[in-house]
Amino acid sequence: MGLHFSVQENLLSGDTAMEKWDAARRLGYDGVELRGTDPADVRARLPELERAVAQGAVFSSYCVISDLFIGAWDADRRAAAIELMKAIIESAGAIGANGAVTPASYGMHSNFLPPFEAKRDAAGDIAVLREGLDVLGDYAHGAGTHVFLEPLNRYEDHMINTLSQGVELLEIVNHPSVKLMADLYHMNIEEADSAAAIDAAMPYVAHVHLADSNRLEPGLGHIGFAAPFAVLSKHDFPGTCAIECLLSGPKDETIAAALSHLKSAEKGA
């Protein structure tokens, strides 16, 4: 059957949700990944998305784009992050998206950059993340979708950097609606062997993000996609591989070339 590829909406031409889906479909993609930044905006957009779905559009997933995260130091900011994710989860469920993506945090702290010392210990991190994922897991279950936890590299987050760390946390959370997302850009930094890491993390991995080693579109760096794709194919991966990257050129041209590169890697797998 093959892997399913989608692309984040900001990388597509068009203004409306339907125009973005039309662009994705024209270029050969199976779906569009949406981006949510504000609860009110996410909810206000839902009628447009539902109309697009009724006309055949496919929205694979919904990714949070914000400075609010479930692992924030401050309890009020964690609560605001939960409310944003609830809005995204509601919309994801309503339009048939597989899940809503969030990292533990982004840009809040790195143990590899000054001041080198976190404001919370590891046990505190786990407690905060477990609390947030418990709430969001229940919410996702009610909405008929999932939460996808995204490990980030050590320079962007200090809590969950590898798939194995993600698995350890999800085993503590123990919620069927909370899954992992594997991002091959971050894994290129953190994992000794990305394919082996994905293989070991199954069946927790339910979504994949794609960018090359330099954060540009696949095909412009040195990541080998064939081996991870072979593992996903071995497991009959039912999820979606979504491109999330910077672009080296015009949208249609670069995104079309990226998909061609990924399809070649899949065949090579």
Image (spheres, rainbow, N blue to C red):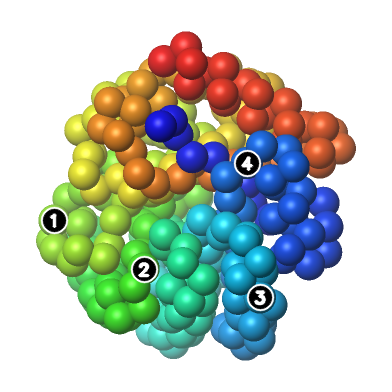
Q: Residues within 10 Å of mark 3 (few under 14, many from 20)?
A: some
In this view, 191 is above or below 227: below
Numbered disc in front, either 3 or 4? 3
| Pointer 2 or 4: first along the chain | 4
In this view, 114 is above or below 230: below
Q: Which mark is residue 29?
A: 4
| Residue 231 screen position, x and y as percent | 31, 25
Nearer-the-camera pick, 110 or 260: 260
| Pointer 3 or 1: first along the chain | 3
| Pointer 4 or 1: first along the chain | 4
Query: In the image, is 67 to the left or to the right of 41?
Result: left
| Residue 24 screen position, x and y as percent | 70, 47
Please, which residue is most extreme toward the top here? 268
Residue, x 47% and y 63% (percent of image)?
A: 97
| Figure quadrant of residue 44 | bottom right
Can you identify the residue that label 1 sits on?
Answer: 171
Query: In the image, is 179 to the left or to the right of 240?
Result: left
Q: CA distance from mark 2 to mark 4?
A: 21 Å
Q: CA distance from mark 4 to mark 1?
A: 33 Å
Can you identify the residue that label 2 sits on?
Answer: 145
Residue, x 60% and y 76% (percent of image)?
A: 50
Q: Circle 1 — which element?
A: helix
Numbered disc in front, either 2 or 4? 4
In this view, 216 is above or below 168: above
- Number of disc labels: 4
Q: Which mark is residue 51?
A: 3
In contact (CB < 8 Å): disc 3 and disc 1: no
